[in-house]
Image: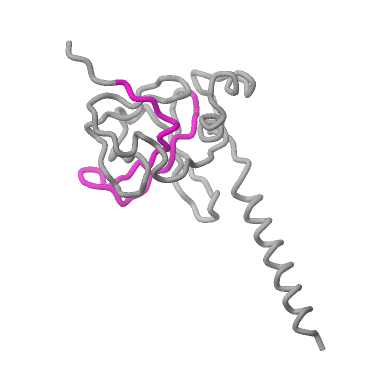
């Protein structure tokens, strides 16, 4: 008959194997692959980006919530890709989702971003990336405000802000 210690050890081993499998499943992803107008080698991306930018834009990591100064930032202007300066989002489309990440109800132009389905958390989510360089921006959820009902939940570190200018 198994002892209590053997049962606990077996349970711990099973949890470790399952957890290790989940870790393997959710890490090591790369930015969107495909034929993008801007295509650099990994060495060129590493030279161009900070370590944190590289982790988000090229390895599809997620910054901690409430860590970006762009989350609670309300100046007029344009949010551009930190990897290639492609205009992605307008300040007029930004809203406070309360999630801790900059959120927009639509991109500046539909063709500015691309999407794909990812399974990093086991269930499917819609990943959003820059259409020019393939850099990971965040995810799109269907719980946003009118008129689209969408929430583009974006990593602030994947964006740079360009203030509006008075012409």
Tell me where the magenta segment starts and ends, as one range. Answer: 133-162
59 left or right of 108 in image: right
Q: How many marks?
A: 0
Across and down, in percent, residue 162 comes to 31, 21
Residue 121 in magenta? no
Identify whether 18 is placed above or below 108.
below
Residue 135 in magenta? yes
Quarter occupied by the N terminus:
bottom right
Q: In the displayed image of the protein, which residue is found farthest to the left? A: 167
Q: Residue at x 28, y 40 (%)?
A: 105
Q: Which quadrant of the structure image shows residue 95?
A: top left
4 left or right of 53 in image: right
Judging depth in this view, the residue of 35 and 13 nearest the camera is: 13
Q: Residue at x 28, y 48 (%)?
A: 144
Quarter occupied by the C terminus:
top left
118 left or right of 67 in image: right
Q: How is the image coloured?
A: one colour
Identify whether 166 is placed above or below 130.
above
Q: Residue at x 36, y 46 (%)?
A: 100
Q: In the displayed image of the protein, which residue is found farthest to the right? A: 1
Q: Residue at x 42, y 46 (%)?
A: 65
Across and down, in percent, residue 134 comes to 50, 28
Across and down, in percent, residue 52 comes to 53, 32
157 left or right of 47 in image: left
Across and down, in percent, residue 3 comes to 79, 85
Q: Which quadrant of the structure image shows residue 92?
A: top left
Q: In the displayed image of the protein, which residue is found farthest to the top? A: 167
Judging depth in this view, the residue of 102 and 72 nearest the camera is: 72
Judging depth in this view, the residue of 117 and 54 nearest the camera is: 54
Identify whether 1 is placed above or below 147.
below
Identify whether 167 is placed above or below 35.
above
């Amino acid at each position: 008959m198994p002892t209590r210690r053997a049962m606990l050890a077996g349970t711990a081993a099973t949890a470790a194997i399952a957890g290790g499998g989940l870790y393997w499943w959710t890490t090591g992803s790369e930015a969107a692959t495909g034929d993008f107008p801007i295509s650099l080698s990994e060495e060129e991306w590493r030279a161009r980006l900070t370590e944190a930018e590289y982790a988000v834009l090229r390895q599809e990591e997620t910054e901690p919530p409430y860590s970006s100064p762009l989350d609670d930032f309300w100046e007029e202007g344009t949010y551009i890709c930190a990897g290639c300066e492609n205009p992605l989002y307008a300040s007029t489309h930004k809203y406070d989702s309360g999630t801790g990440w900059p959120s927009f109800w639509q991109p500046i132009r539909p063709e500015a971003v691309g999407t794909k389905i990812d399974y990093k958390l086991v269930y499917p989510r819609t990943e959003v990336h820059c259409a020019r360089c393939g850099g990971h921006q965040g995810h799109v959820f269907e719980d946003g405000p009118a008129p689209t009902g969408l929430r583009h939940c974006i990593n602030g570190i994947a964006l740079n802000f360009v203030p509006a200018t008075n012409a």
